[in-house]
Image (cartoon, rainbow, N blue to C red):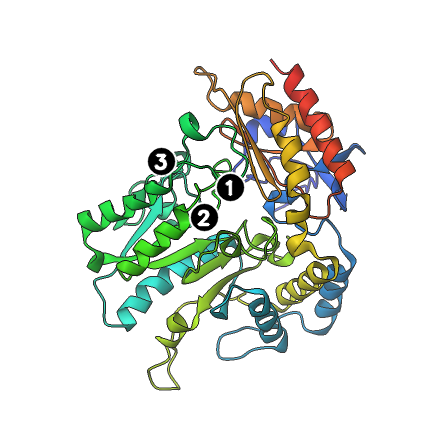
């Protein structure tokens, strides 16, 4: 069959999480990236206000990461991880453990945040079974939570638009209430004062289902994908205490908050909590090669190590778990983080960043502004006739003015690379302020 290839035809690629018809009428296409900027196909420089998709924490096209990938593909392109291995996987795992919160001594490699979540959920259920608690199978997520797009992650996730197309999803799942409270916490700098008591919602679910049926609770330290919902002061510690009380595992979904976004290596460090499992991805390779990892405490890992030595201990994994190129990219990324102090740089920039974020208060239709670490969000008064369009229009207008931001519902999120300078922060907010002032 003769098919004429059209390399720049937009029809073939069904884009994820996109308004495909609108995009293909007026595409936004990148052809290069360097530092904190993209270059479009028509030659315009666009300031990356989103770290790609929350993942390019060290900035684009960093030399050490490029060189690590290049050397790896020339040496060992692929080796599986089922009953065999390669040295890079073990090196990467040990490097990751060296920066992990106290108590985490094992890493299970995946290829994305969605796969990390699926892995952690299965680990939680299997752990209780290995401990003789086979009735603990129920999973608890949170309203407005985002945990990827696989069946388990969508089920524990709490964003209505992500769930409504896919039927009943996985059974045995319930949800805590979300913590977003504009009436008490609007325009908060950092952690809101009000709402720690919302963690007690877990006690309600324990009373409803009984703790003997609940395997794990999964929450994001900061719910970024839904629009940057920052936990109230004391909320996460209170939630952790309730989990401990009822022998429920706590899974921290740190696909976004790990690797320096809050000014600490992990969001768990920032909030002073000690979960049982941590899911990661995105910035683990600075977005260069798909990779994820689940960080596991020894008491979880060791529960699987009781059978005959020759038997598989955890019947789960992926063809590309610990892929050599991904491991090389992770090592190059960790080298870059270490040499440039990027895991703590957000803490240095946070005060200046916060001042610029909150200067947006009072602009047309802005009903909330919030920030934590090197993350900011602006929430707009919804247009009842067209929910989400107000933020979407501002996303498009910002792109046209040379700034990439992230739109979700009626919220714009900002999360630039950690290498951004104060001058570049000023450029970002000068562009965005102009967009908000001129928007209808």
Q: Which residue is mark 3?
A: 164
Asked whether, in this view, residue 225 is left or right of residue 207, the answer is: right
| Disc number lying in front (1 or 3) | 1
Residue 112 drawn above or below residue 421: below
* Residue 190 position in % (x across, y down): 53, 39
* Depth order, front residue of 264/318: 264
**Marks 1 and 2, how far apart in space?**
8 Å
Residue at figure coordinates x 59%, y 19% from the top left: 362
Residue 207 drawn above or below residue 166: below
Query: Would you say the residues marked 1 and 2 are in contact, meaning their CB atoms lie under 8 Å apart?
Result: yes
Residue 314 drawn above or below residue 380: below
Q: Residues within 10 Å of mark 2 (few under 14, many from 20)?
A: many
Q: Please tell me the numbered disc located at residue 220.
A: 2
**Secondary structure beneath label 1:** loop
* Depth order, front residue of 178/191: 191
**Marks 1 and 3, how far apart in space?**
20 Å
Q: Which residue is mark 1?
A: 224
Residue at figure coordinates x 38%, y 70% from the top left: 300
User: Can residue 231 be seen in the rendering of this structure?
Assistant: yes
| First-in-chain label (3 vs 2) | 3
Residue at figure coordinates x 58%, y 48% from the top left: 262
């Amino acid at each position: 069959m003769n098919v004429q290839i059209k390399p720049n035809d937009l029809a073939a690629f069904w884009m994820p999480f996109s308004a495909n018809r609108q995009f293909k009428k007026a595409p936004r296409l990148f052809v290069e990236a360097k530092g904190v900027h993209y270059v479009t196909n028509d030659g315009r420089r666009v300031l990356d206000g989103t770290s790609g998709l929350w993942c390019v924490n060290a900035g684009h096209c960093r030399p050490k990461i490029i060189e690590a990938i290049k050397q790896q593909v020339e040496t060992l392109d692929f080796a599986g991880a089922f009953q065999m291995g390669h040295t890079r996987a073990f090196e990467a795992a040990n490097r990751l453990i060296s920066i992990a919160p106290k108590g985490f001594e094992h890493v299970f490699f995946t290829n994305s945040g969605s796969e990390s979540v699926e892995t952690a959920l299965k680990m939680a259920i299997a752990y209780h079974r290995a401990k003789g608690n086979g009735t603990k199978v129920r999973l608890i997520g949170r309203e407005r939570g985002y945990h990827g797009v696989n069946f388990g992650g969508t089920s524990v996730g709490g964003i209505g638009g992500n769930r409504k197309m896919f039927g009943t999803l996985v059974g045995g799942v319930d949800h805590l209430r979300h913590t977003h409270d504009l009436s008490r916490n609007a325009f908060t700098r950092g952690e809101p004062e009000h709402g720690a008591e919302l963690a007690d919602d877990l006690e309600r679910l324990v009373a409803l289902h009984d703790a003997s049926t609940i395997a794990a609770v999964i929450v994001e330290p900061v719910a970024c994908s839904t629009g940057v919902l920052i936990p109230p002061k004391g909320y996460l510690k209170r939630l952790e205490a309730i989990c401990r009380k009822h022998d429920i595992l706590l899974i921290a979904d740190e696909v976004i908050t790990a690797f320096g976004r809050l000014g600490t290596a992990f969001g768990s460090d920032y909030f002073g909590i000690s979960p049982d499992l941590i899911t990661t991805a995105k910035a683990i390779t600075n977005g260069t090669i798909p990779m994820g990892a689940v960080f596991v405490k020894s008491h979880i890992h060791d529960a699987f190590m009781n059978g005959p030595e020759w038997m598989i201990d955890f019947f789960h994994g992926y063809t590309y778990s610990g892929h050599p190129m991904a491991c090389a990219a992770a090592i190059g990324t960790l080298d870059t983080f270490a040499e440039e102090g990027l895991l703590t740089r957000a803490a240095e920039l946070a005060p200046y960043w916060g001042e610029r974020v909150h200067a947006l208060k009072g602009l047309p239709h802005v009903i909330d502004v919030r920030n934590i670490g090197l993350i900011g969000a602006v929430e707009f008064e919804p247009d009842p006739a067209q929910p989400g369009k107000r933020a979407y229009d501002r996303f498009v207008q910002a792109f046209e003015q040379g700034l990439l931001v992230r739109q979700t519902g009626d919220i714009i999120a900002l999360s630039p690379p950690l290498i951004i300078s104060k001058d570049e922060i000023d450029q970002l907010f000068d562009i965005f302020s102009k967009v908000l002032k001129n928007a209808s």
